[in-house]
Image (cartoon, rainbow, N blue to C red):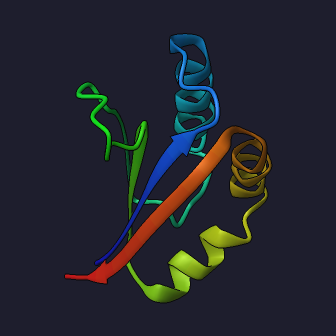
């Protein structure tokens, strides 16, 4: 199983902006065959080192992760995030 985790710091971390971005991320659920699990979390600590949103996704293989990266539904997310994010960090691991 491949786990893909991305944390996002938004340019605008108002409640409305966070909710809009969470909606865009969750909209992938059920639309990408290779995407076996999706979880979206919102930070509640708002500490100096906090990011605003985390996306956790799971795939059966690296090939499935690669297919997800170029899927049209994921490209919609990429377009939104290019406008909304100030920064992002990711980690991908196999378990």
How many labels, in total?
A: 0
- Outermost residue to the top: 16
Q: Looking at the figure, which quarter contains the N terminus? A: bottom left
Residue at coordinates 55% horizontally, 16% vertically from top-left?
14
Determine if residue 29 is in view.
no
In the rendered image, residue 88, in percent from the top left (x then y), is placed at 53, 58
Determine if residue 35 is in view.
yes
Image position of 65 with respect to 81: above or below: below
**3 sits to left or right of 65:** left
In the rendered image, residue 28, in percent from the top left (x then y), is placed at 59, 44
Residue toward you, 16 or 70: 16
Residue at coordinates 60% horizontally, 81% vertically from top-left?
66
- Outermost residue to the front: 48
Image position of 84 with respect to 68: above or below: above
**88 sits to left or right of 69:** left
Residue at coordinates 52% horizontally, 30% vertically from top-left?
22
In the rendered image, residue 46, in percent from the top left (x then y), is placed at 31, 29
Q: Looking at the figure, which quarter contains the C terminus? A: bottom left
- Outermost residue to the left: 95
**49 sits to left or right of 68:** left
Residue toward you, 78 or 89: 89
Q: Quadrant of residue 67?
A: bottom right
In the rendered image, residue 21, in percent from the top left (x then y), is placed at 60, 31
């Amino acid at each position: 199983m491949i786990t893909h985790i991305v944390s996002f710091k938004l340019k605008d971390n108002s409640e409305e902006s966070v909710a809009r971005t969470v909606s865009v991320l969750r909209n992938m659920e059920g639309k990408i065959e290779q995407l076996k699990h999706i979880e979206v979390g919102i930070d509640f600590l708002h500490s100096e080192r906090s990011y605003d949103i985390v996306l956790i996704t799971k795939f059966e293989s690296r090939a499935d992760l690669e297919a997800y990266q170029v899927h049209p539904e994921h490209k919609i997310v990429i377009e939104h995030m290019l406008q909304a994010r100030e920064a992002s960090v990711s980690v991908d691991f196999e378990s």
